[in-house]
Image (cartoon, rainbow, N blue to C red):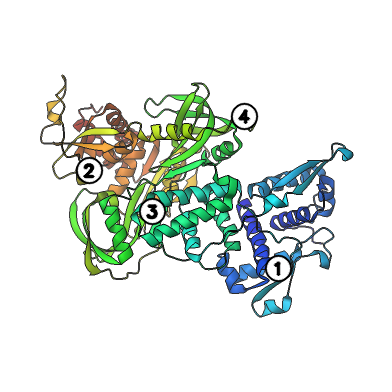
Amino acid sequence: MAERTADRVLRLLGMVAHLDAHGQADLDDLAERFRVSREQVLADVDTLWLTGTPGYQPDDLIDFDAFSLETGVVRLTQARGMTRPLRLGAREAVALIAAMRALTHDLGPALDDERRAVLTSALHKLTTAAGALAETAPVTVNLGVEAHSEVTAAVSRALTDRRRLRLRYVNAADRTSVREVDPVRMIVDDGTGYLLGWCLAADAERLFRLDRVLSADVLDTPAVDREVTTDADRLDPDGRTVTLHLRSRARWIAETVPGASVRNHDDGSFEVDLLVMSPAWLEHLLLRAAEDVLDVSPPEVARQVAAKARAALLAHGEDVT
Amino acid sequence: MATSIPPDERLLDLVIALVNTPTRMTKEQIRTTVAGYTAAPSAVAFERMFERDKDTLRELGVPLLTVTDASHGDDVGYRIDLEAYTLPPVDLTPAELGVLAMAAQVWQDAALRSDSARALTKLRAVAPSAQAGDLVAGLAARVRAGGPALAPLLDAIQRRHAVRFTYRAATTGEVRLRLVEPWTLAAHRGGWVLVGHDRDRDAPRTFRLSRIEGAVRTVGEAGAFPAPDPSVVTAAERRWADAGGGTALLALLPERAEALRARALPETRVPDAKPGDDAAVFEGRELVQVAYRDAWELAEQVVGYGDGVVVLDPPEVRQAVVRMLRAAAALDRDEEVHDG
């Protein structure tokens, strides 16, 4: 709630400063600029109309032209001194600069000249706007994807040139196949690179891990534009739900799996419902996070993972008791 | 006047009043004249409200100054530093705005995400065009949340405030209280680490945020230590990023772990068998060497293959894998007890 209040205050201040610099703006333009609905812009104007300097008589208040507002034009007639755009806060500057530096350094080399130039100029302008706040780097990020690898370079080139790819790919169940894919997006998620694309063999959208792509060839065939969900993830409407009870420390699981629903317990632990598409993905998750797992439902999932772990311990020559 | 003024309106009225005050406003003037505070039912309620609002405004970047005036005794007044208030001119093209919007989406961490969204709102307010380009529509990046320790550590870094927290060591599992001068936070391949000066060991150290248990508390005053020398921070970070990196020797079952096989170094040097080695481990398996950058990261990858991959060397990767496997092997233990 407090978050929302602060976010709205920033938008209202930004709106007044913007209108003061330009005199007026279309309702639609303001809505697009601040990523809110027309109705929200009107509500914002109503709030601004009530604010001003102590006394709060008509002449003390921020004012708009009521007639032009009826025609969809927001015209500021009194700014009450709020003419300056507000500088970036310390954490705001750090968060955006760290993300931009990571994108520029880690993904820049895989991009074509035009895109790389935009990344560089945006980072430069942002750094200038942040002033002294940009001099230190309290947060540094390494996205962890090798922009120079042949696979990343091929995927990036296919995306830029809108061409089909031929991939030799190992899936989570450790089976290798050759597939043709129309690339849609390259996603770097938490240190792992993915290609979101349309797999022609499956005739469906698929997410490919770049570190499981053994080779990628850019074909001469143009890629066909495909309708895909905007944020394809590990979820599948046909998947089954698995509930994990986890220690507080494993909260990253809930935070990084899209659509996970969470119930908190008083002792800091939590339950999370995951819609699981790939049993192999779930097994791998449980093997990695086992120390923080308190309970798994349905129980046969725990039994399968435990059996797999015991087989692996035996293979390592470790005793299983 | 309405009896209840919403907090966003009250904050705006406070900023407008302070921007317009010729010198300063005392707390009493704010309480009796600024809309939203006049309705505070008691001095205590006002005090609580005003303290919270001051914190919020400072967090948003509003340079709120405390001014004490000798002629007014110890009466505290407030004003806004208008020079510092203003965002320097910045002229972003639609394509650049699009790139910044993509950068704001990188964080899965709630605190960092909200901070970068606010930065974006301020930049959009001054952009020549309302539109954002989609030149980089084919790209998206995400960085894992840092957990509850991240925001307090970031604030402590910026204020140069020493911190204390309980930490569980990665290899030994030893739990101990650490006292640290925090320097920087780094996200590497999905894991967040704090780089800082460990006061007890009197040396630079790195700490995984996921191994911090419980709350991070500040110790002593802000500004307690000088800004770290950037080269020392970089060196500590690099030591961490490179530490544990090396070459691992793995034994793979045929037609399993193709992704690891694809990473195999061209020539695998098979070490001499040590006494006590179980020959059966090698039987029917192919030995490959792979380069890795972080022992824990390689262990997390290897563990997913189950018995398809056996780690022969180095011991730290093998121990990490065995530790994960032991925990996983116990997942159905409680249940067996219930069944029995």
Real-space Cα distance between discs 4 and 2? 47 Å
- Left-right relation of B278 to B100: left
* Disc 2 target residue: B263
Q: Are marks 3 and 2 in contact (CB under 8 Å)?
A: no
From mark 4 to mark 1, how far is it between C-alphas? 46 Å
- Residue topped by disc 1: A46
Question: Can you tell which mark lies on residue A68?
Answer: none
Q: Amino acid at mark 1?
A: Asp
In screen coordinates, is A159 left or right of A127?
Answer: left
Name the amino acid type tagged 3.
Gly
Q: Position of residue B43 (x, y in %)?
A: 82, 44
How packed mark 1 is, by other alpha carbons closer than 10 Å (few <14, some 14-19, many 20 or more), is: few
Mark 2 to mark 1 CA distance (whole Å):
61 Å
Q: Can residue A91 be seen from the camera position used here?
A: yes
Mark whose residue sits in front, 4 or 3: 3
Q: Are marks 3 and 1 on the same chain?
A: yes
The residue located at (20%, 28%) in the rendering is: A317
Going from the N terminus, do you reach mark 3 or mark 1 first? 1
| Chain to which mark 3 belongs | A
Label placed on residue A108 = 3
Q: Quadrant of residue A77?
A: bottom right
Dot 2, how many residues are within 10 Å of its Cα: few (below 14), some (14-19), or many (20+)? some
The residue singled out by tag 4 in the image is B224
Q: Quadrant of the C terminus of chain A?
A: top left
